[in-house]
Amino acid sequence: MEAALEKAAADGKKVLFLCDGPPTGPRHGGQMVVFPSPNEKWVRFSEKLDCDLYMPLWTREELHEAARVLALDIDGYEIDRRFEIFGGAARECLLFHQRGVNNATNYIQGAIGAIINQDELQHLLLGKADNAIRDCLLHYEPRPTRKRKTVKLASPFVEQKLAERMSVMTYEERESLRKLLSGVPEAASLHEWLFKVESHDALRQGRQLRARLLPLPEATAVNDNTAPQMDVFDIARTNKVDEFNNESLSRSLVALGPYHKPKSKTWESIDAFYLPRKDVPLGQTVTVDEVVEWNRENRLLLFQMTVSETHDVNASGIMHMLRKLDLLQSVKSDPSRVALVFVVPKDLVDSYVRQTIVTVATAGTESIREIKGIGDTTAGILEQKYGIRTIDELQVAVERYDGGELTLHDGDRRLWTLASTSLKKHGPLSDPAYGDAMAKIPQYVCSWEE
């Protein structure tokens, strides 16, 4: 280090120190950038000297690209698995050796296992716990200016394990903690997480939800004096909640549940769904026609749980779920087969308005960079090696890849697996009719709180 500093000084060059984690003190002789996560002691020290900028965590797609660009011996499934455990922390997600991954996982489990009462959980969430424990269980998340931040749980794995610890707490203890968090602006993400934990538990137990229809803007303008339309959704008790992932999500789930929630807490657009359970003989496969007919009489409820007054929903997430359930075409024809239900705290119900469904239709002539999951690096490789620049060109190439007719360059199979998967998820987004149908799905607001 000292030799490098001396050489830089002799060459008249500036020095930039990049610190992975908080150092013991400031370095002299150059500028310093520190990446703490989230170390309050260092932040309090550094704010007296320089500014703090809160940078976004790595996305799943960025981690995939990093592993590919660096030629790491880590396949896509392992990256996904680590992302579920560690969140967007590149340090753990890109570890070379499995032993390091196991050690980091065990540390998280040990830190959560040491939380044995409400006070300790409260200390963790409100910044009073040991910094080392907070570093592995919580991450900073920047607000739009990146000069302010909120704090969120590090990963779906951390959320799940903490939820298991909370299961021994009484409802009154959880409610007390949630109300405490609601008064802390920087804990907004944690407040929402705790509300979702309670909401899943309430819906799993079964109840009648009295829900108010959120009318379309034009309907509101015409019927300002009309009493709100109220509907009642009967939610049957679920003894064993079906927790699905992208691979297991299919029309066969109509025989399970009836309450279903994704294993991943980062599932796009939907926090859970409810579809009355259909009796299916053991060993019998549910056909597309059967699930479509079942949905004709049994409405699919898509739940979005939030403590926010506004909560935009991506049409792409709804479409992906409907496609996996083989209901996309029928819902396109009749959006009322589905209800999008916003579950909120009871003090928000009366003022809640219809939420925006974000639709982004893309034409086949647009750049492949418009496809979610294909970043600049992947797009650059596809352009340079295969001459693929547009969505239409990628569609043709993926069909050849799936048919075993595409000649791959060495080491590019992971690239094409990612490209194929991303394109298929993108699918209906290129057709504006699907986005229009998603925007017409009836929306409701309700609360399970009494």
Image: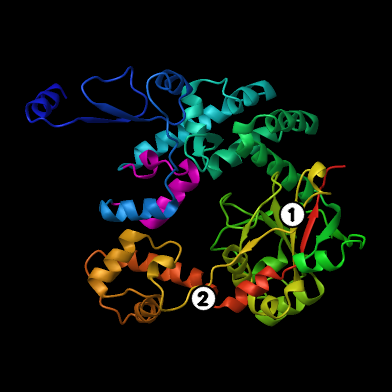
Q: Locate residue 322 relative to residue 24 in the image: left or right.
A: right
The amino acid beneath tag 2 is Ser
Residue at x 47%, y 43% (from the top left corner): 87
**Splitting the image into 4 quarters, where does residue 227 fall?**
bottom right
Closer to the chain start, of discs 1 and 2, is 1
Quarter that holds the N terminus:
top left
The amino acid beneath tag 1 is Phe
Q: Secondary structure at mark 1?
A: strand
Between 374 and 67, the one nearer to me in the picture:
374
Q: Which residue is mark 1?
A: 342
Residue at x 64%, y 41% (from the top left corner): 193
| Residue 116 counted in the magenta span | no
Q: Position of residue 408 (x, y in %)?
A: 26, 73
Q: Secondary structure at mark 2?
A: helix
Q: Is residue 283 visible?
A: no
Q: Position of residue 242 (x, y in %)?
A: 67, 56
Mark 1 burial class by Cα count in 10 Å: few <14, some 14-19, many 20+? many
Start-end of magenta stretch: 73-95
Q: Is residue 237 visible?
A: yes
C-alpha span from label 1 to label 2: 27 Å
| Residue 87 counted in the magenta span | yes
Q: Is residue 58 above or below residue 172?
A: below
Q: Position of residue 57 (x, y in %)?
A: 44, 43
- Main SS, magenta region, reads helix
Q: Which label is found at residue 190?
A: none
Q: Locate residue 74 relative to residue 84 in the image: left or right.
A: left
Q: Which residue is mark 2?
A: 430
Residue at x 27%, y 65% (from the top left corner): 381
Q: Position of residue 254 (x, y in %)?
A: 71, 68
